[in-house]
Structure formats: structure tokens, C-alpha cells
Amino acid sequence: CEVPSRRRVACGSLGISDAACRSKGCCYTQDNAEMPCYYGDTDLVRCSKNGHFVILLEKEMTKPPLDLTSVYLKGGFSTSCNPVNRSSDLIVFNFPVSACGAIKKVEGGYVIYETDVMATRQVLEGPKGKVTRDSLFRLTVRCRYNGSDHQQLEAVVYTLAPPLPATDKGDLQIELRIAKGTLVERGGGGEEGTCSQYSSWYLDSDYPLVKFLRDPVFVEVRILGRTDPSLVLMLDRCWATPNQELHNKVSWSILEDGCPFAGDNYQTVLHKVTVSSGLQFPSHHKRFEVKTFVFMEESGAHPLSREIYFHCSAVVCQPSAWESCMTACEPRRKRSIAHVTQQNHEVLVSSGPVIFLEPE
């Protein structure tokens, strides 16, 4: 019953007694007059004596966190099958064992009721592929009764294994690599980040990398072997593919004209590289952050691959009276760097694979 007050969900009416609350299998406190009786979060499924499923789901029970607004009962088409209570972190279903699509079976003198709790997945469709950042969620629950006796059975959560990251060198000594950084709280500047995210790097021997859906991947593209401080690295396009093929017919845009792809619901975050980063030549580096995803089949129902590879096309620019070597991503100021590539050699660089493994 040690549930923080902000995460509590009411169980029973406001004036419920201590005994009545505990008979429902809930927690009771005298310290909160507005919600004296609430659900604990130690039990996932309860089979009540009056023949009801009571199912409690926490947002953090899966990784990435479960979108509670997408959860539904497999056979629950009436309003009585909707959640009876919800908070920002917890959702509660309470319905008769014979309702909402539950299946009844008789085995060895026991009456068993079984149903599935599922969640929809948001699938994004781009010009050349489909991706999602939501795991497949399915919870099978069972209640077994023997006369007036009841027994709570286990529930199993099934989630899809997500995909992996990687790195490679380009012909003109431009490298794409991935940092080990953890997500650091940003200030109000939006693009402004801290350099601690890019303080250590994955080696070739670390690949394939393992990530969960929506985990941040901190990517850097940099110039190698140049000491001219006037050179500026510019990214044209960055994209992902389900295998090592640069020009696979299935791909997902990450950056277009050096700016975050507008068709993504988790847009890429550009991290400015300044003199405060401690780098000798900050203009030789470009950094961005991607929320990990998995490619989906054409139907949008199943993953296409357990791997993703990142690729970028880049040019090295030298500022002049005619070329500022700057990329503006505001809608009214956005411009293409195509004219820069006409005078500078474009280089393609790729990462190694990022693989997503199913959490145990």
C-alpha cells in the first residue's frame, strides 16, 4: 500500500469504511479524507469474490512506458468495459468475469475465465516506410473459481523486442559515431543541451548496441584529420534503414536539409556545438538526438527488422562573402544546402546496427 498520493486511484465510494475497503482488497488510510480507500500497486490482477476481474496497469510496467490511453479489452466493445479509474500513472479495469469478451472454460472442476488486455500502437507513415516507437502489448489474465472459493492466477506481459545502433567512416574522413550519454535536463532554449551527453563513445567492439523504443540515441558526425578552424561541417540529409543498404527502398528521414524531419512525432533534437563544449574545432562537429524506433511491415502490424542503421550525407563548407555555411531551420528562413554541395564534395557516412531486445 506504499503508493505515493499523486499516483493513487480511488477504490470504492468516499464514505467507505476501513473493513469494507479491505474486503475489496484495497488499501485504507485515515490521512486522506478525499480518498481514504485506494488501490495498491502490488497486485496486477485480482479475482473478486463477487465474480469480477480487477486489473491494475502501471505506466512503468513496460519499457518504453505504456501509453495508458491506448489500452483496451480485446472483446470490450461497450462503455461498461472502459477503465473505471485512471491517473497519470495507473489505470484500473473492473468488470464481471463473464463480460467484455472473457472466455469461460471448465477444467477439472474449476471454472476458468480468461481475457486479454491489449494496447494500440501508433504507426507513423513516411514517404518511404513506416515506423513505430510503441512496443506490442498483450496481457492475458485468468481467474479460476472453485465454488465460493477464488484464486488469483499470474498475468504475463508480452512485448516485442525492439532494434540496435552502429558507426562507419566516410571516404573524406568524416565519421558518424554514437555517444554513451544519458538524457540531461535542458533549459528553456530548446536546442541547447549539455556536452556531458557526448563525453564518452561506443567502440566498434560495442556494436550492435541495445536500446529500448524511445530511448535517446546521441549521434555525432565529425570531420577527421583537418586542422583548419574555418571549415564548417554541414549535414544535408540523415536517415535510417532496416539494414546496411544506404538506398534501401524502406527508410525513415531524420534530418532534411540539415533540419529535423517534420513528419515525425518525436522530432530529432539538434544539439549546438559551441566553444564551451571543450572541442578544439567545434565547427567540425554536428550533433543530434534521435528517439529510437522500429521499422514496421507494410501492413503496420509487425516489425520489419530488429535492426536499424543510421546514415548521413554531409559536406565540408568554407565560409566566404557569398556563403555563410549556416543552416536555418525556422520555417520562414529554412533554405536548402544543395547549392553548397555543388561546390563541395558530398560524403556519405553510416552507423553500425542498433538492435532492440525484448525485455525479460
Image (tube, rainbow, N blue to C red):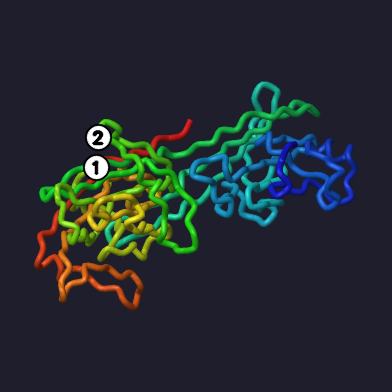
Dot 1: few (<14), some (14–19), or many (≥20) neighbours within 10 Å?
many
The image shows residue 343, relative to residue 85, as above or below, that is below
> Which residue is label 1 attached to?
167
Q: In this view, does 221 lie to the left or right of 24?
A: left
First in sequence: mark 1 vs mark 2: 1
Nearest the viewer among 324 and 55 is 324
Task: Give the percent coordinates (x, y) of residue 54.
Answer: 70, 41
Nearest the viewer among 26 and 170 is 170
> Which residue is label 2 attached to?
204
Q: Which residue is drawn at 68% across and 38% down?
A: 41
The quadrant of the rendering that contains the N terminus is: top right
The image shows residue 113, relative to residue 67, as above or below, that is above
Farthest residue in the bottom direction? 332
Q: Is residue 149 left or right of residue 331?
A: right
Task: Give the percent coordinates (x, y) of residue 36.
Answer: 83, 46
Q: Residue at x 37, y 52 (%)?
A: 290
Q: Which residue is drawn at 46% across and 34% down?
A: 359
Q: Is residue 10 left or right of residue 190?
A: right
Nearest the viewer among 345 and 43 is 345
Task: Give the percent coordinates (x, y) of residue 294.
Answer: 36, 47
The image shows residue 57, relative to residue 335, as above or below, that is above
Task: Give the percent coordinates (x, y) of residue 49.
Answer: 79, 34
Residue 95 shows in the view: no
Label 2 SS = helix
Label 1 SS = loop
Dot 2: few (<14), some (14–19), or many (≥20) neighbours within 10 Å?
few
| Residue 230 position by quadrant | bottom left
Q: Do the residues labelled 1 and 2 touch (CB within 8 Å)?
A: yes
* Residue 25: numbered disc: none
Q: Residue at x 20, y 47 (%)?
A: 175
Which amino acid lies under the numbered mark 1 shown in the image of this protein?
Answer: Thr
| Residue 25 position by quadrant | top right
